[in-house]
Amino acid sequence: MPSAYEYTKEEFAELLVGEPRYRVEQVWHGLWTEGQAIDGITTIPKALRARLAEQFPPSLEVASDVQSDHGATRKWVFRLADGSTIETVLMSYEDRVTVCVSSQAGCAMGCTFCATGQAGFTRNLTSGEVLEQVMFAARAAAPRRLSNVVFMGMGEPLANYLVTINSVKRLHEYRGLSARHLTVSTVGVAPAIERMAREGLPLTLAVSLHAANNDTRSELVPLNRRYPLERLHEACVNWMAATGRRLSFEWALIEGVNDTEQALDELAPYAFSLRAHVNLIPLNPTPGYLVRGSSTQRVHEFRDGLIARGVNVTVRNTRGRSIDAACGQLANVTNGRRRPIPVRSS
Ligand code: SAH
Ligand code: SF4
């Protein structure tokens, strides 16, 4: 079944032949500006709404809906038509409302510390499934306006390249989101970063680095064996040259693994040479990787070490820990496959 969010305006015009011309605008406005599901577009007659609703059933069925941070973080597990599950997280801040969307059901990249990676790959999402996550979250966020979309849920967006690009394009053209409000996070698929740089899309690139020496990175992120740090560096240089934009590095701090003085000395020149912004986030423990996130004190020391070395850095607050909001955790729990281990509260 196609999603209404995969249709162009012209395709809707064809579909609505025989209706007054303004119907197309009403449907389009309802879907994209208001973010309504078809059956919520009350400006069109009931019979037409029913016909369209039948033709475009929702791609997402809520399997679980939990909140934390006093309602500021909300996380859904959605069941798709084929039974696979994905997760979507909505985070409200004072100045923005961000949705974190999945690009794949599961992930084939096998990063050792990641719950999604531990569970393996099921399939690529369609752009309808990606965009419906955004619109579902936009409805839940109302009356606040959803301002940011980050591709940081389950899956590797650049391994589902065309869907990611198409979704970004549509969010830009039809929702008016632009670079500062659209972020694609990648584990470092170097050729795809370079290809995306040439698309001329308004978006921010985040690269999940986690280690700046090849031995450690290959252990944490197996894709590093294919695209080692030197190759990734080249792709980042090309990204900046083509887009004129800086990028950021994600660094999940793991006690004794990548929070050491040696790790600081490796990361600082790598990030500095690219003038990249580093986002630090303490690792969320997952069942298949029994090491701990760094203590709050070590996170701050590591941040200060980067600042002293001239690197821009932010400590990201870990939203939704009590509801397993780390990449992929909640979907696993709902499937009954694994239970997360308790998160220590340091
Ligand atoms: N596949 C893409 C995007 C999805 S993962 C990527 O890897 O970038 C989104 C972010 O969550 C990545 O930065 C990833 O490294 C991080 N992540 C995964 N598991 C985590 C965990 N257990 N604790 C903290 N961050 C984690
Ligand atoms: Fe996939 Fe990203 Fe998890 Fe690695 S961190 S397994 S790329 S979702």
Image (cartoon, grey):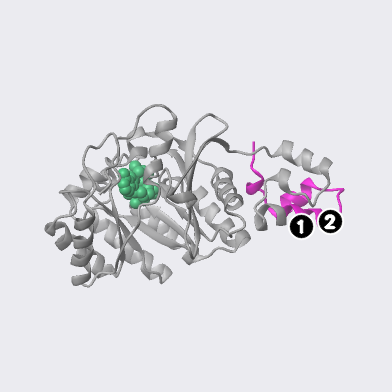
Horizontal and vertical percent for residue 319? 39, 51
Q: In this view, does 171 lie above or below 37?
A: below
Horizontal and vertical percent for residue 75? 48, 44
Q: Pointer 2 and pointer 1: residues touching (CB < 8 Å)?
A: yes
| Quadrant (top left/top right/bottom left/bottom right) for the N terminus | top right
Left or right for 135, reference 270: right
Query: Is 23 covered by the magenta stretch?
Result: yes
Please give the name of the residue rendered at 32% of the width and 41% of the height, measured from the top-left corner.
114
Q: Which of 165 and 55 is in front in this view?
A: 55
Residue at the limit of the structure toward the left, as seen here: 262
Please give the name of the residue rendered at 12% of the width and 59% of the height, measured from the top-left corner.
261
* Principal secondary structure, stretch drawn in magenta: helix
Q: Nearer the viewer, residue 232 or 52?
A: 52
Q: Nearer the viewer, residue 3 or 66?
A: 66
Residue at the limit of the structure toward the top, as seen here: 336
Please give the name of the residue rendered at 61% of the width and 60% of the height, measured from the top-left corner.
175
Q: Decide if ligand 1 comes within 8 Å of the CB at mark 1.
A: no
Q: Based on the displayed image, in which of its 4 quarters is residue 219 positioned?
A: top left
Horizontal and vertical percent for residue 208? 32, 53
Q: Can you tell which mark lies on residue 241?
A: none
Q: Which amino acid does label 2 sit on?
A: Arg
The residue wearing badge 1 is 25
- Crowding at label 2, few (<14), some or many (≥20) Cα neighbours within 10 Å? few
Q: Is residue 276 visible?
A: yes
Instruction: State the separation of the CA atoms marked 2 and 1.
Output: 8 Å
Horizontal and vertical percent for residue 217? 22, 49
The residue wearing badge 2 is 21
Q: Is mark 2 on a helix, strand or loop?
A: loop
Left or right for 10, reference 266: right
What is the tally of numbered marks visible in this picture? 2
Magenta residues span: 1-28
Q: What element carries label 1?
A: helix
